[in-house]
Amino acid sequence: MKLKYRIVSYSAALLGLFHVATAQAQEIADPAGSGVLVSALRWLEGTLLGTIATVVAVIAVATVGFMMLTGRINWRYGATVIVGCFILFGAASIVAGIQSTASLGR
């Protein structure tokens, strides 16, 4: 059972890295010949954070919530999954907030 939670947490972290990398790629001027890579990353972001990811996250939160209520899963692991979904889908807002705070200090 613990292997499943590791896989879920690693995949959520990987999705977050893709999202942050794409957000950074939008702000920095793209070097010549990188149009294919940027469009591939944007397609991957759209696929992983679009409708498919939303449906999977809703199913995951519902399943984990039901398992927490029936006592089949520890509340700490359940909260980790739910907080991970919030971080994954709110990554762009989190990065924008950090960048605006960092620019105020200059």
Image (cartoon, rainbow, N blue to C red):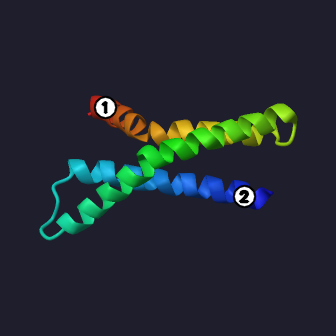
Measuring from the top left, give residue 58's x and y in whole percent: 58, 38
**For the residues bearing labels 1 and 2, Cβ distance under 8 angstroms:** no
Q: What is the number of the mark on residue 100? A: 1
Q: Is residue 11 left or right of residue 27?
A: right
Residue 5, x across and y down, in percent: 71, 54
Residue 100 position, x and y percent, is 31, 31
What number is the disc on residue 4? 2
Front residue (pair 56, 79): 56
Q: Horizontally, is 72 left or right of 46 in the view?
A: right
Which quadrant, please, contains the C terminus?
A: top left
Q: Quadrant of residue 64?
A: top right
Q: Residue furthest right?
A: 71
Mark 1, residues whose alpha carbon is within 10 Å: few (<14), some, or many (≥20)? Answer: few
Q: Amino acid at mark 1?
A: Ser
Please name whichever residue, 71 or 21, is drawn nearer the observer in this view of the structure: 71
Q: Give the residue displayed 87% in from the left and 36% down from the top.
A: 71
